[in-house]
Image: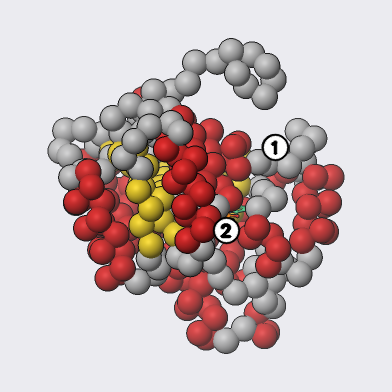
Amino acid sequence: MTEHGKMTARLDFTGTKVFVTGGTRGIGRAIALEFAKSGATVAVNFLRNREAAQETINELNEFGEGHIAVKGNVADPAKVQRMYDQIREAWGELNVLISNAASGVLKPAMEMTWKHLHWTMDINAGAILPLSQGAVALMPEGRPGKIVAVSSLGATRALPNYFAVGASKGALESMVRHLMYELAPLGINVNAVSAGVVDTEALTHFPNREEMLGEGLAKTPSGRLTTPLDVANSVMFLCSRYATQIHGQTIVIDGGSSVVA
Ligand SMILES: NC(=O)c1ccc[n+]([C@@H]2O[C@H](COP(=O)([O-])OP(=O)(O)OC[C@H]3O[C@@H](n4cnc5c(N)ncnc54)[C@H](OP(=O)(O)O)[C@@H]3O)[C@@H](O)[C@H]2O)c1
């Protein structure tokens, strides 16, 4: 049943192996759960919060077997390789990578250090390189592979305190297009989703959280804020057979807020 009370057919991802970075909280967790509900086997990555990882695995297990949690910083290529070693040991292959984990320093540019900038760029943008290389190495030839990166509206717009995170998301969207150029010929779709304001724990790090939520809602023509499930549904669509000719795009999921003048 949907939230509107109607029966709907689910996309079927039975037999699909999915790796979701930052898959234990917020948007990543919603993506992991939707894939599991649709028959996929999921590996969720996390960095520090083992309790949230265990809770997510418990929930995933309600929809099938074989799900795993893999710990590691996506900005450390050696740790990324170690996570792929665990995935190879568990499943032998991978079909879908969702590059969702993000972090970053939220500060005005005039207060930011070089280290803050590079730390943010490495996690939010640079990580897509070892993540994609490791994923492609595990994708079986002759079966379509999918890579979806999770971006934000700060990639193309100016927001307070978003100097480093916005730049990292802009770089991420460009990397998605360039990865697409190399991977589309191999039958791998590379795309991004860009979400409007979503009320997750990440927002507690913003000094202006309440203002963001209030303004976000007021400026959204659909009349409600974007939810983790809205983002998960779009990711599922991009990974489905209905989106096989979509390559190198960034799909915006924001209830229309970004096109309002
Ligand atoms: N929330 C929004 O309004 C919004 C809007 C647009 C786009 N987005 C994007 O959506 C994605 C998810 O955001 P969210 O709000 O769901 O975040 P969140 O609730 O803060 O969850 C972040 C997840 O990423 C993991 N993580 C953080 N840094 C990591 C690292 N270096 N290596 C590996 N894992 C790491 C965390 O693991 P631990 O639990 O171990 O810390 C956690 O599982 C991000 O790409 C974000 O930019 C969010």
Please report the residue visible at 22 percent of the width from the left and 43 percent of the height from the top: 91
Residue 53 left/right relative to 135: right
Residue 78 point in image, percent of width and height: 27, 71
Q: Secondary structure at mark 1?
A: loop
Indicate the quadrant containing the N terminus: top left, top right, bottom left or bottom right. top right
Tags 1 and 2 in contact by the CB under 8 Å rule? no
In this view, the residue in front, 59 or 3, is 59
Please report the residue visible at 59 percent of the width from the left and 37 percent of the height from the top: 229
The disc labelled 2 sits on which kind of residue? Ala
The disc labelled 1 sits on which kind of residue? Gly
| Residue sitting farthest toward the left | 141
Residue 126 picture quarter: bottom left
Q: Is residue 100 visible?
A: no
Report the disc number at residue 255: 1
Of the two numbered discs 1 and 2 in the rendering, the one whose residue sits closer to the viewer:
1
Residue 168 point in image, percent of width and height: 51, 66
Where in the image, quadrant-wise, is ligand 1 located? bottom right
